[in-house]
Image: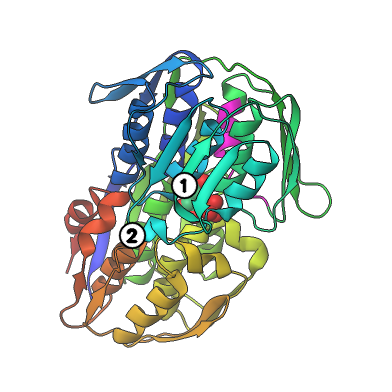
Amino acid sequence: MKRVSGKITVSPDKSVSHRALMISSIARGKTIVKNFLRSDDCLSTMACLRKLGVVIKDEGDRIIVDGRGPKLAAPTETLYAGNSGTTVRLLSGILAAQNFKTKITGDGSLSARPMKRIERPLKMMGASVRTSDGKLPMEITGGNLKNIDYASEIASAQVKSCVLLAGLYADGKTTFREPMRSRDHTERMLSNFGAKITSSSDGPGFWVSVDGPAVIESPGTLEVPGDISSAAFFMVAAAILPGSRITILNVGVNPTRTGIIAILRRMGARVEISNRRESGGEPSADITVEHSDLIGIAIGADEIPLLIDELPIIAVAASQAVGATRVTGAEELRVKETDRIKSVVGELLKMGARIEELKDGFVVEGPTKLKGAAVASGGDHRMAMSLAVARLAADGETRVINSECASVSFPEFYGLLNKITAN
Ligand code: S3P
């Protein structure tokens, strides 16, 4: 078995990077974005915004967005969102208020993902939205929007952000309700740009409102923290590999994203948070994780939104923990970049893990000595990186087919992992 050690920084936050580009594009004034994530997904957002007439300069250590204010320019060609659900779903909220027609497509994986969840509220607000039975390609013809009070059946930051961005253009208060609070980067950033946001988590569920119509103003500079979803692969590697200790500097620790810390601690991992600070409304800190013996735990529906993207790597951690780890209430995993319940169960079984599929999650019985195998990412970046960590805990050779898709969120992943891994 290998071990990992050292002090690292991981890639900038994907969710915050997308939002930084989109929100500065529709604000008045120039925004300097520091520590922007240049991954395939965020570059898809950048390319779409440029086609909508936004001038975005990439100066290496910073991105400069020349905000156009609320109105974008009609694109002369179809927008391509690549593999990125965040690009399509958030941008749709803005496009719903533009008085022109836009067509958006994506790659094979994105074209299989559900878009009804944004089609429904945007139509209620008065936009004309056409999909192929709830899937891409999608055509949006925007217009004057009316405010809505929308209760979503699922907790989803993408749907919430879509509605809030459209709400900036509507007359009056637009409210989004969800059963549990999903990540709140959009609300935080819109507040930072001067929009009037109110929210509450009293009572069952959570709601957030934006007052429209609003013309937002650039705060000047935005600094993106490191991505806790990218840090999670290194946190789990350190937790499961004997002799490991790593510190990850400047990681975003927004409380709507830190489920992975709570879960690892509950499993018995040693996780220390230090040097807490805040920038542009987002908290960040350094995270140190050391190896220790882990135990299996139950993870239920109320925690899922706080760690939705981390469930594949949590399955890897669970394979090394004593006892059963049971994840339920996670049916949303079935509509991610792959059906992540099927992918994680199928691929970890090939490596000898004792893992069983549930309709809304999985059960892992540990610990098992993983063994080398040929496994496949299925083109899913988080599966590729989870399998790369499982490989370190396995005896023999593991080959991950289609591993290069890690570049969707974390282009430097393999270089960094190699650098901190020792025998
Ligand atoms: C994201 C929200 C989540 C998450 C995705 C990024 C975002 O999706 O899984 O990776 O940036 O808003 P859902 O809103 O579909 O839960």
Looking at the image, how many numbered discs can be counted on the residues? Answer: 2
Of residue 88 and residue 134, the one placed in the foreground of this image is 134
Above or below 148: residue 243: below
The picture places residue 59, in percent across and down from the top left corner, at: 24, 21
Above or below 133: residue 62: above
The picture places residue 270, in percent across and down from the top left corner, at: 46, 62
Q: Which residues are magenta?
A: 181-190
> Which residue is drawn at the image coordinates 60% and 28% (left, top)?
143
Q: Which mark is residue 253?
A: none
Of residue 398 and residue 127, the one placed in the foreground of this image is 127
Please identify the dominant SS of the magenta region: helix
Residue highlighted by disc 2: 108
Q: Is residue 187 magenta?
A: yes
Task: Report whether 75 appears left or right of 256.
Answer: left
Identify the image quadrant of residue 241.
bottom left
Disc 2 secondary structure class? helix
* Quadrant for the N terminus in the image: bottom left
The picture places residue 198, in percent across and down from the top left corner, at: 74, 32
Q: Earlier in the sequence, mark 1 or mark 2?
A: 2
Residue highlighted by disc 1: 138
CA–CA distance in space, label 1 to label 2: 14 Å
